[in-house]
Image: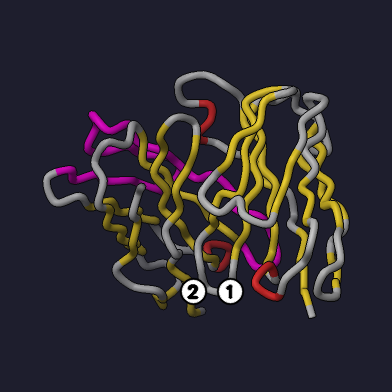
């Protein structure tokens, strides 16, 4: 099965700075790599995905980078805001199923 | 649209009791999923369904059962509750197609404690 891990379980960021959240995976057969955000007491919410044949994709204030050579995925959040405080999960997709990593808790300092 | 709704929000069960966690979506999604999330962990897939009448096991199906008689509803049944089933349970749905299933829409979760 898939194995998805994260480099750091927690990340503290000053408001206005950029955040970088990292994720490592062991199986490169996935079609897509995805990031989800989970705010306290809520279900996860889709942020952005990237197809396996791409190395970069940008969204609104977010950029996902994929390095298949070293099996590494990252999420960059520009100008981090208090509303970005949450747990962030990377996930791999195969056959319409997702495998989630353990999550990184991001805390934004005022 | 209400999206994905789950009931109940909280429940305490005694060991050996049974219960059904309800899940309903109003987005006409074919794909539905049940996950459990233990403290500090990611989500583990319990069961999923690709359409009415079709269900399949995920990563951690033991101790659970599901049914999918309609597109909208995907209940999860716990037959003999055990302390190891203490967790937060999330239901999710997604559309079909090449990328659509990457974006799963999650309910607010059910927090279950088995004592």
Magenta stretch: includes residue A42: yes
Q: Residue at x 54, y 57 (%)?
A: B43
In the figure, residue A60 lies in which quadrant?
A: top left
Q: Residue at x 77, y 60 (%)?
A: B110
For the question of whether residue B30 can be seen, the reply is: yes
Q: Which residues are magenta?
A: A39-68
Q: Tell me if residue B109 comes above or below residue B2 in the rendering.
A: below
Residue B45 in percent (x, y) is at 56, 49
Magenta stretch: includes residue A82: no
Residue pushed farthest left?
A69
Q: Is residue A62 left or right of residue B34?
A: left
| Residue hosting label 1 | B39
For the question of whether residue A13 can be seen, the reply is: no
Residue B59 in percent (x, y) is at 51, 50
Q: Nearer the viewer, residue A20 or B65?
A: B65
| Residue hosting label 2 | A108
Q: What kind of element bears circle 2?
A: strand
């Amino acid at each position: 099965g898939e194995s998805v891990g994260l480099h750091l379980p927690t990340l503290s960021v000053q408001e206005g700075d950029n955040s970088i959240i990292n994720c490592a995976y062991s199986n490169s057969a996935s079609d897509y790599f995805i990031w989800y955000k989970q705010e306290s007491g809520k279900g996860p919410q889709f942020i952005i995905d990237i197809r396996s044949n791409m190395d970069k994709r940008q969204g609104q204030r977010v950029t996902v980078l994929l390095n298949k050579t070293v099996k590494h995925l990252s999420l960059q959040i520009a100008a981090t805001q208090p509303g970005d405080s949450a747990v962030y999960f990377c996930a791999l997709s195969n056959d319409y199923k997702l495998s989630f990593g353990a999550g990184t808790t991001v805390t934004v300092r005022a | 649209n209400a999206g994905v709704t789950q009931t109940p929000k909280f429940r305490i069960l005694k060991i050996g009791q049974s219960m059904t966690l309800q899940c309903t979506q109003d987005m006409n999604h074919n794909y539905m999923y049940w996950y459990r999330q233990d403290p500090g962990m990611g989500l583990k897939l319990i069961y999923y369904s690709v359409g009415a009448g079709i269900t399949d096991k995920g990563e951690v199906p033991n101790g659970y059962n599901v049914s999918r008689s309609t597109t909208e509803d995907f209940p999860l049944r716990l037959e003999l509750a055990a302390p190891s089933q203490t967790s937060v349970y999330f239901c999710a749905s997604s559309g079909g197609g090449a990328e659509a299933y990457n974006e799963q829409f999650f309910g607010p979760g059910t927090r279950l404690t088995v004592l």
